[in-house]
Amino acid sequence: MGKKRVYLETFGCQMNELDSELVAGSLTSLGYSFTRDSDDADIVLYNTCSVRERAEQKVWSRLGAMKTAKKDRPDLVVGVLGCMAERDGTDLMHRMPVVDVMCGPAELDKLPELIDNAVRTKAALAADDPSMAIRKSAKAVALQGSASRRSSTLAAAGDSLESLDLGRMVSPVDVDSKRSAYVRITRGCNKFCTYCVVPHTRGAEIHRPPAHIIDEIKMLADSGVVEITLLGQTVNHYRFEHGSAVTVDGVVQPQKGRTYKGSHHRDSFAGDETTTFADLLYRIHEEVPAIRRLRFVTSYPRDFGNDVLEVIRDCPRICRYIHVPAQTGSNRMLKMMNRGYTIEEYDEFIDRCRSYLDQPELGRPLMLSGDVIVGFPTETDEDHEATKRMLERSRYKNCFIFKYSPRPGTVAYDKIPDDIPDEIKRARNNELLALQARISDEIAREQVGREFDVFVEGLSRKEHKKRGTDVKPGSGMVGITINGAASKAPVAVMDEAVGGDELVQFSGRTDGDLIVFFDAPAQRTDLVGTVVRARVMDADRLNLRGELI
Ligand code: SAH
Ligand code: SF4
Ligand code: F3S
């Protein structure tokens, strides 16, 4: 029996992208290899998302195709990982018998064992009676179960899941092609917004120990990563309570490893035993200077203290980019969504962010982005107008706009009928998209003439298209595809594609997450993964064209 080949496709948010990367790393270290073609795989895994119905439909159609594929390949192992597995539970297996393995996002540390079980049982069944393998299959399931939200302390269960992040393996492939990495700081969510499945699928909020986070970032930096994006559903809630170290005479000692002394950053600080989000940012910035860009998503519009804003202002390598979804501009909707803030409080927060962080004259304008849900139950024209005014005031560089999708298991699904007709949702959605497009365009034009530090990511998409080197889904990422498309052009692919002193178009990002295109000689592939200085000459929508200076 040769090396088993795995096809892994990812849907949903950055949290899932990271989970897929970690799972791929752990399976690789156990001897599995990866393929970019599901026809060529022994094991097909879908890392799924449940946040909107549409995300789930994509997976149902993939599973339908697998049902056909399995007729010819009865040994094929099919697995559903992630949020959809957790939300649907074993119902999904009953509905789709093609699924052999199910694994929730909080159980991914168990995945290799589950796959191994499924593969072995299938082999055994096939050896006994080849027809058995077709009719029967080895089901292997690890789900957290809706009844048992893991406790918010690092329970034994949390510890074993922690091993997935701690066991992170950076393969030479990744080092070659990836200068940017996600690092989780918080799992789960405790907010229970009434429309949202995430607290049900990802479980209770658990904060990772700062020492683990910093070790992981150091390891990534050592392997060539220069940009880190910290991940959590509500990153600003990050808070790690260190076990109190009490000496014999009863005095509480500061914990070992605390080097941070910047007391002016501490207005939401509970004492030496706690690491707040501000502390964490500061520690990463000071302890891992090789990280040129430190970013974080997603911020929650409440409980975001000035201490965090001060750290961002004072630390040059922390990006001036905040993704802070308002969801709606209407107080009535905010209340029904259980968001826990008013639109006046949201506006106050945005103003505070600008007063601390908006420094366009230094090439560091603050860039904000958001998410909005249209057509939440009972949303009136008046509520919709309030959202339009919120977009005008917030002036996001970009905003994701979603039509409300009722999700089984959430409070809104159970208690508030989805009464806004789809054509109204669609019309409101289009109206907000057009409004945001105008604002994005204005923001882009405001950048003309300004100078920025630009983190170079690779050849631009356009350049790849021109050369026919457009990246196949998943290239450079051990065969992981994300929503069926490649996210970035890896350097390895680029080196093969270019050469000489002919000018080619590169793309990169400002620390406010604005995309900048610029021309440079083709042989300057060494620019990739570095920060260059560029002046913006021209802008169109969110595409900035710059010149190196
Ligand atoms: N933790 C983040 C968001 C995670 S989900 C936050 O609180 O901001 C990403 C986005 O999906 C949300 O911001 C919301 O805009 C959207 N979303 C979540 N549930 C949804 C639903 N049932 N229907 C439509 N959009 C939804
Ligand atoms: Fe969902 Fe609200 Fe948690 Fe965001 S904060 S993940 S929208 S419940
Ligand atoms: Fe989707 Fe789960 Fe992320 S529901 S948005 S994959 S946390």
Image: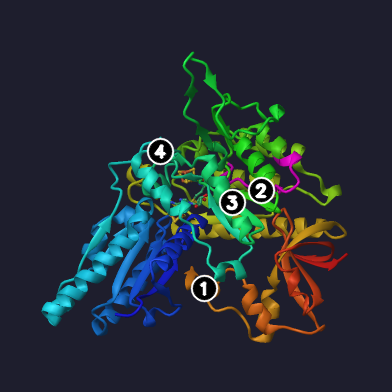
Residue 145 image offset from top left, x and y in percent: 28, 47
Question: Is label 1 or label 3 in front?
Answer: 3
Q: Earlier in the sequence, mark 1 or mark 3?
A: 3
Q: Sequence-wise, which precedes: disc 2 or disc 4?
A: 4
N-terminal-most mark, 4 or 3: 4
Which residue was labeled with disc 2? Answer: 288
Q: Which image quadrant is residue 277 in?
A: top right
**Marks 1/2: CA distance?**
29 Å
- Residue topped by disc 1: 474
Q: Nearer the viewer, mark 4 or mark 1?
A: 4
User: How far apart are the alpha carbons under marks 3 and 2?
Assistant: 7 Å
Q: Residue furthest left?
A: 129
In percent of width and height, residue 195 lies at: 42, 46
Asked if residue 161 lies left or right of residue 402, the reply is left
Query: Magenta span covers which residues?
Result: 312-329
Q: Quadrant of the rendered structure where residue 126 is?
A: bottom left
- Measured in 3D between alpha carbons, the distance from the residue under mark 4 to the one under mark 3, in whole angstroms, is 20 Å
| Labelled disc at residue 217 | 3
Mainly helix, strand or loop, the magenta region? loop
